[in-house]
Image: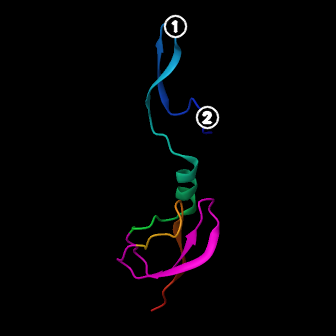
Amino acid sequence: MFGNNIGCEYKTAIGTGRECSRQVGIISPLTYRNMKKGTLKSGTKVRISGQYEIINRLGKPTKVERTVVAGEPLPPTPKKGQSYRLKDKTKH
């Protein structure tokens, strides 16, 4: 799915074979996984108040949660590559 030739427009130069002239629409596997799981990056303003769990870069929960109020940005994650997912909505 994410091979070397995916996402390139090719031009052929004499004697050099195929060269990638520019990359088009490449989505890394990590970004694709986060889009599929419905995760949010730190700094994103949330629409729903509640408990947001931290998700590691492989998409697994870390058992650490943060309480965030609607309209406020998510705090920074402890490690690079982590994101957030809504676990429990606040009950009013």
Quarter holding the N terminus is top right
> What amino acid type should be assigned to the residue bearing mark 1?
Gly
Residue 87's spot in the image, x, y percent? 56, 77
Q: Residues within 10 Å of mark 1 (few under 14, many from 20)?
A: few
Q: Give the range drawn in magenta.
A: 45-73
Q: Quadrant of residue 3?
A: top right
What's the mark number on residue 3? 2
- Relative to 20, does residue 61 appear above or below in the rendering? below
Give x and y (percent) for residue 26: 49, 40
Residue at 50% x, 33% y: name it: 7
Using the image, determine if residue 9 lies above or below residue 33: above
The mark total stands at 2
Residue 76, by quadrant, is bottom left
- Residue situated furthest top in the rendering: 14
Say which residue appears at 58% left-offset and 48% top-offset. 29
Q: Name the residue under label 1.
A: 15
**Which residue is situated farthest in the front direction here?**
79
Disc 2 residue crowd, few under 14, some 14–19, many 20+, Cα 10 Å: few
| In the image, residue 40 above or below residue 23 | below
Query: CB atoms at circles 1 and 2 under 8 Å apart?
Result: no
**Residue at image coords 62%, 72%:** 62
**Eye-nearest disc, 1 or 2:** 1
SS at mark 1 in the image: loop
Q: Earlier in the sequence, mark 1 or mark 2?
A: 2
The stretch drawn in magenta includes residue 80: no
Q: Where is residue 44 in the image (x, y as percent from the top left)?
A: 40, 67
Answer yes or no: is residue 50 visible: no
